[in-house]
Image: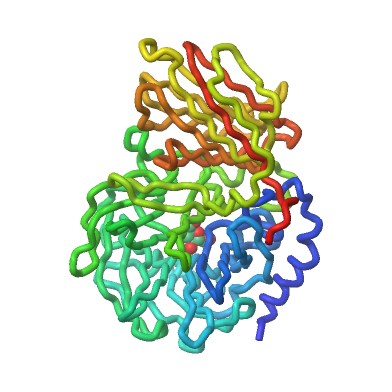
Amino acid sequence: MASEKLNKARAYEEQYAAYVPEAERSMFHVTGPIGWINDPNGFSVYKGEYHLFFQYHPYKPVWGPMHWGHVKTRDFIRWERLPAALAPDMPYDKDGCFSGSAVELPDGRQLLMYTGVREEYQPDGTLKPYQTQCLAVGDGRDYEKIDANPVLTAKDLPKGGSESDFRDPKIWKEEDAYYAIVGNRPADGSGSVLLFRSEDAFHWQYYGCAASNHSQYGMMWECPDYFRLDGKDVLLVSPQEMSPIGLEFHAGNGTVCMIGEADENRHLIRENVHAIDYGIDFYAPQTLLTPDGRRILIAWMQNWDTARSQPVTNRICGHMTLPRELRVRDGRLIQQPVREIENYHGERIRYMNVPLSTETFLTGIRGRTIDMTVDVRPANESSMYHWFKINLAKDGEHMTTIRFKPDQGIVRVDRSRCGYRFDIVHVRDFPVYSRHGRIRLRTILDRHSLEIFINDGEQAATIMMYTPADADAISFEAEGEVLMDVEKYDITFDKEED
Ligand code: FRU
């Protein structure tokens, strides 16, 4: 039976979601019904559909006592809203149902594994959080927290582990057992990822440490995910308090992908480490495995350092990224927009071999809900151009720019003029692999967001841009002689699906 707190959240979202202006939402990216959302949770397959839960505070567009919101989809593009799934209504989670994950049980029920947070004042007046791992079971709509909660507590931690930073379980099933990894802080205060094992998904034992950062990549590692892909073991983490490393990792809350081979204790021996997304608004990614064998990632399309800088009149805060198909190639994570987006392609507009130097607008190339691929190359193999630019979401006052400089091999995303009224980070530079000035830039725009996929997914960069909806012009510029191909589709829900 739903608790009073959960019923209150369900009644609130039911009553007020309709008042959120459609223009505030994305068209095909997930938003919450009302209020605030952050991390994706419980991204999983259940009874043939994809379920997504999320960190959720319905009552205000700012972070607050965490509930779990809930949506589902058959194709990652059109999502159906379901009522809030969890509320912080038990003594062990009274201060929040933090991030977690989900799995389908053999008896047909869906299991949610999440972090319960309870805070208590200490004799010295400080407030101490206690984080434990908890379970709820349900039918894809309604969930009951189990009586045995919490199932993982301080007593299950290795020596020196922190009971205040013990969160974000990611569960998966293998042939012999269930496994879950959980973020933790070892005695040195940095970050680690702990692995637990269970025969039945309800009784858990500590198995070992999957990875430790030794303060190398930020401090506490949040929202870990661990899977095998293309013959490699891949660990994704979202570190807090990162120090920048060149242009690879920026300061603050970042995301890191570690690729390597797990040893016999499932500890990851790293071979390559790189950022997952090189933009500004991307955090806490989580993946699932589809029945047809694809590893799909979704992330919070915000970041703790920038999320609070949206227009002050907004009723909602928080969008999810477009789900991405992952591969591992040459030791790197490759990310491509989920192929289902192509089912929503409207008319194709295409230009080939366009010569560029001064600012150029092309008939039909505009829009704010589009999938556009631009291929750039030097017009003349013997003279390299200096830079190439795409200006998007543009009117007389606004624009967001993607610039590529082939001699440096650096892409710059600049949203300083996109409409933000807050002086936060608006520019990001990152190195790319370009061959003789050739680069492919695929851009997905959905009203307030821009996701860039470079060279067929070698790199991705994601930003939010709160630009007025009618700023939809796109132009191209270059210094030096450039040839360009452009292919653009509007994203449309008008085509009937069969
Ligand atoms: C990551 C995070 C998680 C936590 C949740 C709380 O963004 O800080 O570690 O479970 O958000 O909302």
Whether 389 is drawn above or below 171: the answer is above
- The foreground one among 343 and 476 is 343
Whether residue 99 appears in this view of the structure is: yes
- The foreground one among 131 and 56 is 56
x and y percentages locating residue 12 in the rendered image? 75, 67
- The foreground one among 447 and 2 is 447
Q: How many marks?
A: 0
x and y percentages locating residue 22 in the rendered image? 77, 50
**Quarter-wise, where is residue 424 in the image?**
top right
Quadrant placement of the C terminus:
bottom right
Q: Residue at x 59, y 73 (%)?
A: 88
Quadrant placement of the N terminus:
bottom right
- Asked whether, in this view, residue 183 is left or right of residue 121, the answer is left
Q: Residue at x 35, y 64 (%)?
A: 184
Whether 347 is drawn above or below 108: the answer is above
Q: Residue at x 61, y 61 (%)?
A: 64
Whether residue 251 appears in this view of the structure is: no
x and y percentages locating residue 192 in the rendered image? 31, 60
